[in-house]
Image (cartoon, helix red, strand yellow):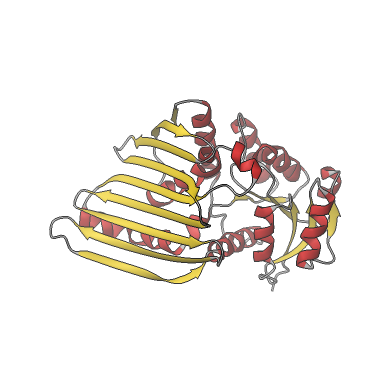
């Protein structure tokens, strides 16, 4: 039996707190050994509320924090603009890294490529958080995508739309929903269909909506829309795949108060109008995060490959930053 990964947190706000609550339930895989945040009271609350003792705490010197030998991996959950600099410092210090998306804000592709190369050279794992690859509904679609193509013909369109509650924190009012979220949408397309040269058109983006259209070289049309305007704490995701002779549609609804997900996948054959619906048993949204964290630990211990490739991570962040800056973009 291998020892649990000794994990430190850089940034102790909401994202990190959620990760910490999950890894506390995974004692065979993780032990929380460090916490860094510029706000001392946030660090103290992070540690005390989870009784993560003994735990190294730091709120001033990141280099000092990363020099702690008892910390072998870090999770970066700070605001976007700090991600790349902190990831670079962590890799330089010899730590494995799981960085929240997006990996950078603005111009950072060249530096990110350098960091990823350094991680490989040092035999370190660099990963990020794309939960949909571990959500039951999208794993089901991935498992059956070959059957859909056989039954319904070539895939013509991918449509993904989400409807979330209004931003609940002040900094979200100044954020770009496209930069914050389209990482997930383009990663889902790559997960289902693989990478392909793609042209993108930004239709709109602000703190509470974004709309993007795109088309691959093979002719697959892609539409992403997202809105944060609901008055209740609900997250609703809808994926629709249009084929030549049929349609597959997924509905995923998260009640963020209970943390439980209800979902279904429906398949419609256009030629005879037959429909098959698969309903999933209600389950915790944290199940997908557990999948991400298990993969990170297993990759560090050499039991599995990292579920994201360098190409995945670079593409996911590059196109989002390009579309924030410009109306058109290409991958």
> Eyeballing the image, is 94 above or below 146?
above
The residue lying at 62 percent from left, 58 percent from top is 296
Q: Is residue 188 left or right of residue 49?
A: left
Q: In which quadrant will I find the N terminus?
A: bottom right
What residue occupies the far front of the structure in this picture? 231
**Residue 196, quarter of picture:** top left
Q: Nearer the viewer, residue 177 or 138?
A: 177
Q: What x and y, as percent, mark residue 82?
A: 70, 39
Residue 331 is at least partly visible in this image: no
Residue 287 is at least partly visible in this image: yes
Q: In which quadrant will I find the C terminus?
A: top left
Q: Is residue 169 left or right of residue 35?
A: left
> Eyeballing the image, is 202 above or below 88?
above
Q: Is residue 99 left or right of residue 62?
A: left
Q: What x and y, as percent, mark residue 108?
A: 62, 32
Total labels: the figure holds: 0
Q: What x and y, as percent, mark residue 144?
A: 33, 61
What residue occupies the far left of the structure in this picture? 272
Q: Nearer the viewer, residue 252 or 307?
A: 252
The residue lying at 29 percent from left, 56 percent from top is 248
The residue lying at 44 percent from left, 32 percent from top is 204
Q: What x and y, as percent, mark residue 109?
A: 59, 32
The residue lying at 48 percent from left, 47 percent from top is 229
> Eyeballing the image, is 104 above or below 139?
above
> Eyeballing the image, is 158 above or below 293?
above
């Amino acid at each position: 039996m291998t020892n649990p990964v000794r994990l430190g947190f850089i940034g102790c706000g909401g994202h990190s707190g959620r990760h910490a609550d999950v890894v506390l339930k995974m004692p065979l895989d993780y032990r929380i050994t460090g916490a860094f945040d510029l706000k001392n009271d946030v660090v103290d609350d992070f540690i005390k509320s989870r009784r993560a003792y003994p735990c190294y705490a730091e709120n001033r010197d990141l280099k000092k924090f990363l020099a702690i030998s008892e910390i072998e991996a870090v999770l970066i959950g700070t605001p976007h603009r700090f991600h790349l600099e902190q990831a670079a410092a962590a890799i330089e210090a010899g730590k494995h890294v799981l960085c929240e998306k997006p990996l950078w804000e603005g111009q950072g592709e060249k530096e990110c490529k350098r960091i990823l190369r350094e991680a490989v050279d040092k035999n370190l794992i660099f990963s990020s958080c794309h939960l949909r690859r571990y959500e039951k509904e999208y794993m089901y679609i991935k498992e059956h995508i070959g059957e859909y193509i056989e039954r319904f013909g070539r895939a013509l369109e991918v449509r993904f739309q989400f409807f979330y509650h209004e931003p609940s924190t002040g900094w979200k009012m100044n954020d770009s929903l496209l930069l914050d979220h389209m990482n997930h949408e383009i990663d889902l397309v790559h997960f289902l269909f693989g990478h392909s040269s793609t042209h993108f058109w930004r239709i709109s983006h602000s703190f509470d909506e974004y709309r993007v259209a795109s088309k691959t070289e093979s002719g697959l049309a892609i539409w992403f829309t997202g809105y944060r305007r609901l008055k209740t704490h609900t997250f609703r995701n809808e994926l629709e795949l249009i084929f030549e002779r049929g349609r597959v549609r997924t509905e995923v609804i998260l009640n963020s108060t209970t943390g439980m997900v209800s979902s279904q996948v429906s398949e419609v054959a256009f030629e005879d109008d037959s429909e098959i619906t698969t309903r999933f048993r209600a389950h915790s949204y944290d199940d997908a995060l557990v999948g991400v964290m298990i993969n990170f630990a297993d990759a560090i211990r050499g039991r599995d490959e990292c579920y994201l490739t360098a190409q995945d991570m670079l593409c996911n962040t590059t196109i989002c930053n390009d579309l924030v800056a410009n109306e058109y973009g290409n991958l």
